[in-house]
Image (cartoon, rainbow, N blue to C red):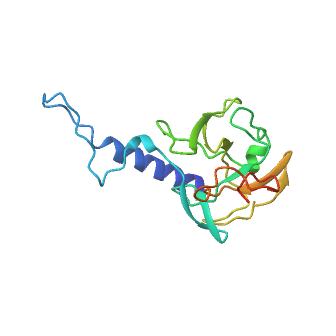
Amino acid sequence: MKKRLAALLFAAAVLVAGCGGGGSTGGGTNPIPGPTQTPAAQGNLPLSEAAGGSNAWVNPSSHRTLYFLDVDTATGGTCTGGCLGIWPIFAAQAGSVGSDNMTVITRSDGAGQQWAYQGHPLYMYAGDSGPDQTNGDGIPDFGGHWHVARPAAAGSATPPPGDPGCHGYC
């Protein structure tokens, strides 16, 4: 049911995005989007909203909390195979462009493009049954610990001394 709803929402978004294409009347220039239009290049950029008692990055369509595995990096993801059944990737839509510390990476296992925050690939957790749940936070699994991906506080680009290995995300 959830997959069907997600597929319908994606199809509706594609249809809506394609509605503004029309033919050219010879002007030769493309209009600049107005202030109320969101550039399509942002794709499915994660949102920051309250989850688990403080702000967290969430999937913009389902509002499911996003997680990272502390041993994953942008160049060497360890969540593959069976791991992806429990921790599905937060895939970047075609044309998605990063912003600040949010980037789009290409997975080395052929699973496509994925969002990453501060170099950590982002995943959802199969144990979260609804929006803004954080049931996967702190789970030791697949060679590391899973943490809710939380926006860094202003001015805290590096983890504080004595950080317990969470790289500022705990």
- Vertically, is 19 above or below 25? below
Give residue 165's position: percent from left, percent from top: 81, 52
Q: Residue at x 82, y 56 (%)?
A: 164
Visible residue check, residue 138: yes
Give the tally of numbered discs: 0
Image quarter of the C terminus: bottom right
- The image quarter containing residue 112 is top right
Quick one: which residue is furthest to the left in this view? 26
Give residue 148's position: percent from left, percent from top: 70, 58
Q: Residue at x 74, y 37 (%)?
A: 77
Foreground: 13 or 46?
Answer: 46
Whether residue 15 sits left or right of residue 168 in the image: it is left
Foreground: 125 or 12?
Answer: 125
Visible residue check, residue 1: no
Image quarter of the N terminus: bottom right
Q: Residue at x 53, y 45 (%)?
A: 100
Q: Residue at x 39, y 43 (%)?
A: 40
